[in-house]
Image (cartoon, rainbow, N blue to C red):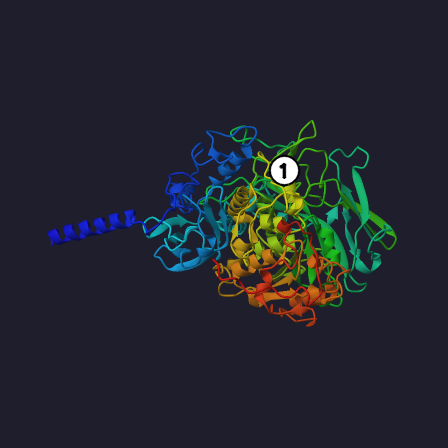
């Protein structure tokens, strides 16, 4: 028996040796099997180290001087003032406990391959036991480095072991089979955790009051260890109740300044000319639909860092290392600790208490990017008339400066009060709210000579701001559970078992995260969301803003046209065939975008989509959530492609309402704002659908000519339905049937 075992072992070793050295006849190209990033298949657990403080028991470990910085194709010993953004990005990746949940897989070769020969049978991801999980799509080949890249077709599970497979049936440009580690390369990798941080924050908010780890106690809420009173909304400021009979407030679409007026602090120094700007608040709630308008504030635990001076961007190793707008990462076995508490504004629209006696069901509204809680007046048309109270608060960094005010004229009497603006001057230019992420997340910094330096947290796009905004909405929900008291109406006006959510655009993005995190919100409507953020930006009307960040990066990533806004990434859409990179710098852009998505997953909607229904949290597994996604054909702001990422990750095509903008009279317009913008044909139908869903839980097709429920052709979430900005063409929309539906997916990948 001992001799038999020895002979078997010898045979296995000899066979393995033969496989390792066997080369297909005529093969001239092989998979590179080096020891550094870019010289071997990636992702690979070889790029991790053991770390008991992480849930995966691993941590990413890129090595400076070996794996990065790669400048002009050559790895340098360290970064300089000309390229430090590269080091900053890798330092951020080194805090993660595993690889991306939808990874970009890289395979470097010793020569060129025939990209047409790559398919899902020979390039795929499997489980740790070898069962097929996903092919690779959006395939590209970079002739400059002979590197094949593809993005996982499937959103992978967190903290899970997978394998990359690549076989020798891929061909080189001479039609010969490549040398793939013998007959096949098999590389193990472990995915990161991503949703756990926000889930643990939510759990810490629900700990017993006596628990020292309670988030409200840690944030310093008054008497938080003995009472929930400090969580409640206050609607009184300077001894005045800011509650107004809705019928006594004049409705408005624009100036003149009557009804509701916002005065925004747009400069840090309130004494400078033009520090404040006033404008009318559009109000589309029909007279008689609402009972009261109320304006107030509540406290929320603050996890985003904010220095006392209001402006700070420390390089690594200097001072505390924190960056304004960032939620500092912690090991994944830990729960972040709040820095303190922020008082943030809230606007309330109530039903008529005589017609609908409280307690009322409540709907919290999430405003869009660069928008504000004032948008409640253009998105809550029917809610109050159906007996639903609606509330809204600003996303992180929104609402302009802290000295911003609201003035309400009711029955001829004007009342002015603070609106608790959340914007801050993070870039040091003296202005508030002038940048798209000025206060939402880490940003570039203006220097005395007016030049601008990049953020030292370059791949934290809007992740931190999105996480903080979810926390704020969870805090608002718990403020209602603590009891909503409105002067002149009554106390405990909300039914805590019927708290819902709806959000538009950015509000749909963090709303997806909220619905995938918090059991308090049992029902939700998400309008025109998308993800991940960097992919929204590069394919949409935000492309120019992304270009501005790429331009100030060290080094600059702008590589020229034909792509709009000065950069071309050569990255096909998921529905497109494989593509050979032809523009210098495109591969570096693909890497940057992939690394940003990888880092940002814990603050990105597609990460939380599976938790809504596909992989529900134990907190609501026995009582499934009721939800619906409204998406618009030809959306040029978040894009159908980005919406499709969320829907595929959560596997809920059956819950998609598709607004066929191409079949409406306003087909030429960007339909992104169709739930709020009265100039778009579908607004009334969208508002009616929203009200019906919130009041009954049913999705009713309020205009079958323009709305599909469920979406008739899921492939329509694979196309932009306007020119890809990488071609250099602007967004153009045609009426049905000229634009047509998206074709089926190709077989490649």
Q: Residue 524: x and y, percent?
A: 61, 61
Quadrant of the rendered structure where residue 716 is? bottom right
- Is residue 32 in sight in this rendering? yes
Coordinates of residue 730 in the picture (x, y in percent):
69, 52
Q: In the image, what residue occupies the spot 58% across and 53% down?
A: 531
Q: Categorize mark 1 by other alpha carbons within 10 Å: few (<14), some (14-19), many (20+).
A: some
- Residue 627 appears in the rendering: no
Q: Position of residue 472 (x, y in %)?
A: 62, 49
Q: Residue at x 44, y 36 (%)?
A: 67
What count of labels does the image hold? 1
Does 418 sit above or below residue 177?
above
Left or right of 460 in this view: 748: left
Q: Nearer the viewer, residue 122 or 704?
A: 122
| Element at label 1 | helix
Judge by depth and name the residue closer to the eye, 616 or 538. 538
Residue at which label 1 appears = 551
Left or right: residue 409 compared with residue 647: right
Quadrant location of the N terminus in the rendered image? bottom left
Residue shown at 72% from the left, 43% from the top: 400
Q: Is residue 297 above or below residue 688?
A: above
* Drawn side of residue 552 relative to residue 49, left or right: right
User: Which residue is painted at 80% across and 33% down in the image?
Assistant: 272
Check the image and report above or below for 688 versus 553.
below
User: Whole-percent x and y of residue 667?
Assistant: 73, 62
Q: Quadrant of residue 592?
A: top right
């Amino acid at each position: 028996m001992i001799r038999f075992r020895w002979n078997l072992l010898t045979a296995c070793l000899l066979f393995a040796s033969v496989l390792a050295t066997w080369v297909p006849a005529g093969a001239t190209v092989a998979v590179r099997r080096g020891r550094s990033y870019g010289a071997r298949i990636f992702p690979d657990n070889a790029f991790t180290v053991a770390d008991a403080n992480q849930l995966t028991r691993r941590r990413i470990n890129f090595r400076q001087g070996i794996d990065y910085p790669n400048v002009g194709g050559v790895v340098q010993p360290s970064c300089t003032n000309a390229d430090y953004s590269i080091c900053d990005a890798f330092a951020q990746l080194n805090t993660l406990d595993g690889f991306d949940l939808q990874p970009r897989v890289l395979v470097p070769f010793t020569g060129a391959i025939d990209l047409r020969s790559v398919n899902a049978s020979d390039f795929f991801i499997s489980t740790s036991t070898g069962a097929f999980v996903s092919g690779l799509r959006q395939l590209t080949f970079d002739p400059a480095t002979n590197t094949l890249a593809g993005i996982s077709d499937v959103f992978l599970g967190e903290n899970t072991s997978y394998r990359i497979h690549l076989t020798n049936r891929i061909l080189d440009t001479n039609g010969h089979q490549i040398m793939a580690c013998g007959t096949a390369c098999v590389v193990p990798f472990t995915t990161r955790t991503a949703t756990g941080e926000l889930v643990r924050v939510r759990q810490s908010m629900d700990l017993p009051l006596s628990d020292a780890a309670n988030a409200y106690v840690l944030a310093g809420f008054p008497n938080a260890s003995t009472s929930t009173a400090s969580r409640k909304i206050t609607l009184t400021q300077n001894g005045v109740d800011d509650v107004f009979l809705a019928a006594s407030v004049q409705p408005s679409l624009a100036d003149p300044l009557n009804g509701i007026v916002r005065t925004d602090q747009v400069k840090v120094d309130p004494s400078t000319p033009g520090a404040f700007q006033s404008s009318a608040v559009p109000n589309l709630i029909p007279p008689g639909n609402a009972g009261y308008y109320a304006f107030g504030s509540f406290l929320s635990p603050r996890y985003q860092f904010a220095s006392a001076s209001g402006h700070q961007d420390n390089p690594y190793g200097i001072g505390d290392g924190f960056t304004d707008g960032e939620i500092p990462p912690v090991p994944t076995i830990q729960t972040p600790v709040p820095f303190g508490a922020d008082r943030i504004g809230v606007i309330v629209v109530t039903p008529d208490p005589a017609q609908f006696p409280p307690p009322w069901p409540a709907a919290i509204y999430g405003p869009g990017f660069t928008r504000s809680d004032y948008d409640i007046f253009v998105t809550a048309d029917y809610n109050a008339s159906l007996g639903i109270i609606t509330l809204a608060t600003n996303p992180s960094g929104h609402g302009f400066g802290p000295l911003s005010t609201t003035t309400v004229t009711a029955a001829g009497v004007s009342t002015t009060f603070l609106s608790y603006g959340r914007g801050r001057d993070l870039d040091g230019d003296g202005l508030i709210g002038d940048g798209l992420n000025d206060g939402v997340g880490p940003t570039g910094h203006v220097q005395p000579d007016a030049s601008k330096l990049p953020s030292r947290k370059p791949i934290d796009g809007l992740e931190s701001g999105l996480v903080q905004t979810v926390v704020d909405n969870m805090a608002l929900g718990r403020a209602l559970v603590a009891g909503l008291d409105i002067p002149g109406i009554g106390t405990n006006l909300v039914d805590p078992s019927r708290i819902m959510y709806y959000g538009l655009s950015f509000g749909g993005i963090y709303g997806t995260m909220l619905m995938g995190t918090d059991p308090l919100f049992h029902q939700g409507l998400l309008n025109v969301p998308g993800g991940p953020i960097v992919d929204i930006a590069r394919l949409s009307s935000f492309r120019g803003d992304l270009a501005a960040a790429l331009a100030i990066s060290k080094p600059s990533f702008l590589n020229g046209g034909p792509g709009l806004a000065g950069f071309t990434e050569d990255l096909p859409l998921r529905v497109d065939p494989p593509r050979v990179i032809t523009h210098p710098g495109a591969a570096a852009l693909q890497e940057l975008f992939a690394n940003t998505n990888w880092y940002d997953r814990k603050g990105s909607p597609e990460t939380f989509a599976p938790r809504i229904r596909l992989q529900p949290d134990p907190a609501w597994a026995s009582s499934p959530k009721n939800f619906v996604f409204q998406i618009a054909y030809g959306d040029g702001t978040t894009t159908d492609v980005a919406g499709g990422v969320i829907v595929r990750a959560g596997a809920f095509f059956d819950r998609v309402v598709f607004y066929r903008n191409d079949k409406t009279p306003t087909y030429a317009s960007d339909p992104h704002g169709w739930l709020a913008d009265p100039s778009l044909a579908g607004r009334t139908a969208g508002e009616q659908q929203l009200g019906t869903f919130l009041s009954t839980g049913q999705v009713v097709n309020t205009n079958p000519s323009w709305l599909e429920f469920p979406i008739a052709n899921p492939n329509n979430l694979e196309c932009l339905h306007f020119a890809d900005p990488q071609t250099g063409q602007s967004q153009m929309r045609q009426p049905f049937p000229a634009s047509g539906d998206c074709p089926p997916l190709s077989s490649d990948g």
